[in-house]
Amino acid sequence: MRSVIKYGLFCVLTFSMVVLTAFGQALPEGKWQLVEYSFHNKIAHPISGIAITMNVDGKGAIGGKSGCNVYGGSYAVDNGKLKITDIISTQMFCDDSSNQFEHDYFAMLTAATAVKLDTGTLTISDAKTKRFLKFTKLKS
């Protein structure tokens, strides 16, 4: 009987640790590259030859290349919702299309409320507007 109780407690503790770990880290660590996005109800792909990246660490920081500039910020999970804040970037001189893309990209990051990892694709989205960013993981 004691072994059944011990096994039951072990299962409950293991399950609890897995659930807490999954909710404690909203974004999976690593370097990600943008492959698809929707800012204005239209699905698009980044311009060929321009890598849009997001580096995620396990301590609540993100950063990467937004096209013309380099950016950084913070992320957290609050009541099960993703929250990306404090985005800053360099201020390089960029053409108008790059400036508009970066403005929309940063707006999407700060509006995001959900994150999903499915078969190697990381999707960050805003449930209200249905806008999203899709990334694939880059090899180290």
Image (cartoon, helix red, strand yellow):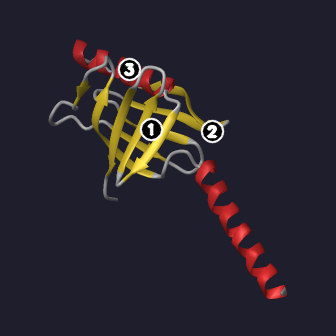
Q: Is residue 58 left or right of residue 135?
A: right
What element does badge 3 sit on? loop
- Residue in view at x 67 percent, y 36 percent: 79
Crowding around mark 1 (Cα neighbors within 10 Å: few <14, some 14 to 19, many 20+) is some
- Is residue 52 visible in the rendered image? The answer is yes
Compute the Cα span from label 2 to label 1.
22 Å
Question: In the rendered structure, are the residues bearing label 2 and label 1 in contact, judged by CB atoms less than 8 Å apart?
Answer: no
Compute the Cα span from label 2 to label 3.
33 Å
Q: Which residue is mark 2?
A: 80
Q: Amino acid at mark 1?
A: Gly
Q: Residue furthest right?
A: 2
Q: Which residue is mark 3?
A: 91
Residue 68: quarter of image: top left
Question: Image height check: is 12 above or below 130?
Answer: below
Q: Residue furthest left?
A: 48
What element does badge 2 sit on? loop
Residue 109: quarter of image: top left
Compute the Cα span from label 1 to label 3.
15 Å
Q: Which residue is mark 1?
A: 63
Q: Residue furthest top?
A: 96
Q: Is residue 126 left or right of residue 6?
A: left
Q: Amino acid at mark 2?
A: Gly
Can you give x and y, in whole percent of width and height, for residue 86 in the image?
56, 26
Can you give x and y, in whole percent of width and height, for residue 115 in the image?
48, 40
Crowding around mark 3 (Cα neighbors within 10 Å: few <14, some 14 to 19, many 20+) is few
